[in-house]
């Protein structure tokens, strides 16, 4: 077998340039004994905890691969539940930053999370329309509630009662009784999606937010309470009261009930009226603070509307005042005013406090009422900013004051160009509003300079200045020491799409949308403000072409210049005479990026047709065409002193290729949206990439060798694991497909756990058979013959086969045990039941439960009963 070429693996080194992702929600967390100072925000697959006072990142809760979609802190403030795009939920400890518990139940992104009052249960809603209740203490799923026909948007526990209320994009609000796990009431009056829910006035009022500008207010009457309150009430009245829930509302269509069940046993929900918002678009977030005194909401714009909800005492005082006024008026008019006609209007009970206008569109918010009566609000904005506001509620006219704004850690818009300095230390990133210089080792932003919409950039030799090409056709020259804009030149009549430094480092070349390639040289000119000369640039030549120029590159010996045009071809010219040399045609769509290898032998071109073509620069022949990405290839660059190159695509992936063997080496996965550009360090050790998810990622070349066959094998395994997770769930015998179901789902972990259990039972069977055989041999021989010990059992300290099965069971996570047992073939179940029986009855009972004092005990017991049920079936 011939020697295979060895490559070195590139691995993720860091994520930076991101303050917060706009996908999930922001949440105040209690850290170091302080509330209202630290805020947790989603950051791609991680969760960042920011100190709003100092503007510093204090904690990173590291995720795996999937993007964060939802956050919810626990009532005790010690944990944070994080929902992900793939439907998994992880519970992190805020003290250690570790994920203690993982729940797998949803098939799509988690959209809503809520803890109950004590923090023992967690409820999650998802895009897969299911609601799942999880037992956090026992680390297992309790049950799945099915009923919504579209994504669940909000879930809320009622504090004192074992009830749950959920809303969805199917326009329904559902009430669930968690004792019997069924939906006992459905509000069907909303015309559009219900995007938000909030409970106020000690859970006697429900407020719903939809796609219009109304906040609908519903009165909740708890029927059981009414009956308990008036024991002396006549029977006729009682029966009349208890039938109110089932009574039909002729005037209002909002309280129609879908279910024929006797929901009057629990509560009656009737519409009181509506509060008009100022925003005309849909509700994005509707929430209250923990006390329920403050209600806030926002739409798809930059305005947060804050309301105050009066308590019962405040409402009573206000009503008394109103009655006094009414009596005064009646006396003046000498009329008798009936007392019952004076009532508080809904607008008086729920008063508008103020509107807070943020600097950009709001994506989510959280609010907390401090004991001093000051309201603290944090806003997560669409453009990578976190803003904090304080609102003094005791003031006559409450005005929101912005106390902090976290911006330094990233750009406001997508980064469209990246560059490395010649010493591999500094990274330049430029977006629509600013140029930032980052230190590669500390990942700190060391310079921020305002610019126009940047499309291309480079470090001037010496790394003291940078040049940025803009969408308006200008070239902007910045001095890094002072951070000042030194010069702006109108270079092209259209966008400057590409810029390339000449190999002799005396100048550069630009290509623009005005069908021109312009050659520039660096020069020193006299500075008007100082005695010293400063760097400038002057145009020396121009090459006029027939099509827009998309990309330009010099060959390393500076003899050739390659120009990519809008007509899908790449034209190669001699640099000195500008005479035409080669035309590279074959792409079906324009070539967006290209690069020439260090020895000038190869040119690789990446196109919007998703292909990469490798050409010889001697004759212009196409060596190979590779299907590179599932969408446009946005950037391509060779690794220094090699024929390896990287490509970035709109399919969120970065790939490494070998241009000699025409092989795909590895894929760098991490970005969650389109990758716009990348840059390789001059020594080839680092790759930095920028994406539409607002993040910049640094990848580092490790010393770990990469073998292609192993890489392909790992890829196949990952594909298999993915396909397993998408398979149909196992059907439980005797289980009806109603509105409840099992909480868990089949994953690769549950299958592996089931395989381990099966192997343990197989070993137990073998050992039992060996024992029988051994007894027979001893009987025949008439003396004791030593029995050889199984090496697996010896490794566990010479334990018995049944104890080994127990050890395997102990290592299965609580949250995965139920699903693992469901996928077991039935032939293993009788042995398993015998083993359970043995451990319970033969003196191992204490040991068994002591070992399961971690959150395993309940599950094992439940599984025992479940399997017993299976066997009886």
Image (cartoon, rainbow, N blue to C red):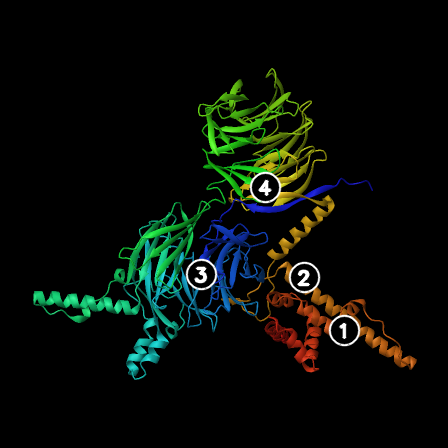
Mark 4 surroundings: few (<14), some (14-19) or many (≥20) residues within 10 A: some
State the SS at label 4: loop
Mark 2 surroundings: few (<14), some (14-19) or many (≥20) residues within 10 A: few
Q: Are marks 2 and 1 in contact (CB under 8 Å)?
A: no
Question: Cα distance, mark 4 to mark 1?
Answer: 54 Å
Question: Cα distance, mark 2 to mark 1?
Answer: 23 Å
Q: Which mark sits nearer the N-terminus, 4 or 1?
A: 4
Residue 861 in view (yes/no): yes
Q: Is residue 625 above or below residue 839?
A: above
The residue sitting at the front extreme is 531
The residue sitting at the left extreme is 334
Report which residue position mark 1 lands on.
799
Q: Is residue 788 above or below residue 403?
A: below
Residue 688, given in percent of the width and then of the height, sits at 59, 40
Question: Cα distance, mark 1 to mark 3?
Answer: 51 Å
Q: Which mark sits nearer the N-terminus, 2 or 4?
A: 4
Q: Are marks 1 and 3 in contact (CB under 8 Å)?
A: no
Residue 440, numbered circle: 4
- Give the quarter of the figure containing the C terminus: bottom right
State the SS at label 3: strand
Residue 96, numbered circle: none
């Amino acid at each position: 077998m011939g020697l295979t070429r060895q490559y070195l693996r590139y691995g993720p080194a860091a994520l930076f340039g991101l303050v917060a992702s706009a996908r999930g929600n922001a949440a105040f967390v209690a850290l170091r004994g302080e509330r209202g100072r630290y805020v947790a925000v989603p950051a791609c697959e991680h969760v960042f905890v920011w100190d709003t006072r100092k503007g510093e990142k204090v904690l990173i809760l590291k995720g795996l691969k999937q993007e964060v979609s939802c956050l919810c802190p626990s009532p005790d403030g010690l944990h944070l539940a994080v929902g992900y795009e793939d439907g998994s939920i992880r519970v992190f400890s805020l003290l250690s930053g570790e994920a203690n518990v993982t729940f797998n139940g949803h098939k799509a992104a988690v959209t809503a999370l809520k803890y109950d009052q004590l923090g023992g249960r967690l409820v999650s809603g998802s895009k897969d329309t299911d609601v799942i209740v999880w037992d956090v203490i026992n680390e297992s799923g309790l049950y799945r509630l099915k009923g919504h026909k579209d994504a669940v948007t909000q879930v809320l526990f009622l504090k004192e009662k074992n009830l749950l209320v959920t809303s969805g994009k199917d326009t329904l609000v559902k009430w669930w009784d968690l004792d019997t796990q069924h939906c006992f009431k459905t509000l069907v009056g909303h015309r559009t999606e219900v995007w938000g829910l909030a409970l106020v006035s000690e859970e006697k009022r429900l407020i719903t937010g939809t796609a219009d500008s109304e906040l609908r207010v519903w009165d909740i009457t708890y029927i059981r309470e009414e009956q308990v309150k008036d024991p002396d009430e006549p029977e006729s009245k009682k029966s009349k009261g208890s039938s109110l829930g089932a009574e039909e509302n002729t005037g209002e269509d909002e309280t129609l009930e879908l279910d024929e069940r006797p929901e009057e046993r629990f509560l009656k929900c009737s519409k009181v009226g509506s509060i008009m918002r100022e925003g005309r678009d849909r509700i994005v977030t509707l929430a209250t603070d923990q006390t329920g005194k403050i209600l806030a909401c926002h739409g798809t714009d930059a305005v947060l509307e804050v309301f105050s909800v009066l308590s019962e005492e405040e409402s009573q005082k206000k009503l008394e005042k109103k009655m006094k006024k009414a009596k005064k008026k009646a006396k003046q008019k000498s009329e008798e005013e009936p007392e019952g006609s004076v009532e508080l209007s809904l607008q008086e009970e729920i008063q508008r406090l103020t509107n807070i206008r943020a600097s950009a569109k709001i994506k989510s918010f959280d609010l907390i009422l401090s004991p001093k009566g000051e309201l603290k609000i944090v806003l997560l904005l669409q453009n990578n900013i976190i803003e904090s506001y304080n609102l003094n509620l005791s003031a006559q006219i409450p005005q929101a004051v912005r106390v902090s704004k976290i911006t330094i850690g990233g750009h406001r818009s997508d980064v469209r160009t990246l560059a490395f300095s010649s010493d591999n230390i500094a990274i330049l990133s430029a977006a629509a509003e600013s140029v930032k210089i980052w230190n590669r080792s500390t990942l700190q932003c060391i310079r921020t300079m305002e610019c126009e919409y940047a499309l291309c950039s480079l470090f001037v030799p010496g790394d003291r200045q940078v040049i940025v090409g803009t969408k308006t056709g200008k070239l902007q020259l910045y001095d890094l020491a002072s951070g000042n804009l030194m010069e702006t030149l109108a270079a092209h009549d259209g966008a400057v799409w590409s810029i390339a430094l000449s190999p002799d480092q005396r100048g550069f070349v630009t290509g623009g949308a005005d069908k021109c390639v312009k050659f520039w040289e660096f020069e020193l000119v006299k500075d008007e403000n100082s005695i010293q000369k400063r760097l400038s640039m002057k145009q020396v030549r121009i090459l006029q072409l027939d099509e827009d120029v998309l990309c330009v590159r010099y060959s390393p010996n500076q003899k050739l210049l390659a120009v990519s045009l809008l007509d899908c071809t790449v034209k190669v010219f001699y640099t000195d005479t500008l005479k035409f040399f080669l035309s590279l045609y074959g792409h079906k769509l324009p070539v967006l990026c290209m690069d020439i290898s260090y020895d000038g032998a190869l040119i690789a071109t990446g196109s919007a047709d998703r292909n990469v073509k490798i050409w010889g620069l001697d004759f212009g022949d196409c060596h190979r065409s590779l299907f590179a990405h599932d969408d446009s290839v946005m950037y391509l660059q060779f690794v220094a002193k090699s024929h390896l190159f990287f490509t970035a695509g709109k399919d969120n992936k970065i790939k490494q290729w070998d241009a000699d063997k025409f092989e795909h080496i590895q894929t760098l996965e991490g970005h969650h949206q389109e990758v716009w550009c990348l840059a390789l360090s001059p020594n080839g050790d680092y790759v930095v990439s920028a994406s539409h998810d607002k993040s910049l990622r640094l990848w580092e070349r490790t010393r770990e060798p990469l073998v292609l066959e192993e890489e392909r094998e790992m890829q196949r395994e990952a594909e298999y694991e993915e396909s397993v997770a998408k398979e149909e769930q196992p059907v439980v015998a005797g289980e009806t497909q109603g509105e409840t179901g099992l909480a868990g789902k089949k994953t690769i972990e549950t299958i592996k756990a089931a395989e381990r259990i099966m192997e343990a039972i197989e070993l137990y069977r073998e050992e039992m058979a060996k024992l029988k055989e051994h007894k027979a041999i001893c009987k025949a021989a008439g003396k004791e013959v030593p029995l050889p010990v199984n090496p697996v059992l010896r490794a566990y300290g010479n334990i018995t086969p049944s104890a080994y099965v127990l050890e395997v069971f102990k290592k299965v996570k609580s949250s995965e045990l139920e699903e693992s047992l469901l996928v077991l073939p039935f032939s293993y179940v009788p042995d398993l039941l015998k083993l359970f029986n043995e451990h319970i009855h033969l003196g191992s009972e204490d040991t068994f439960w002591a070992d399961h004092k971690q959150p395993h005990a309940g599950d094992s017991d439940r599984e025992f009963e479940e399997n017993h049920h299976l066997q009886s079936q």
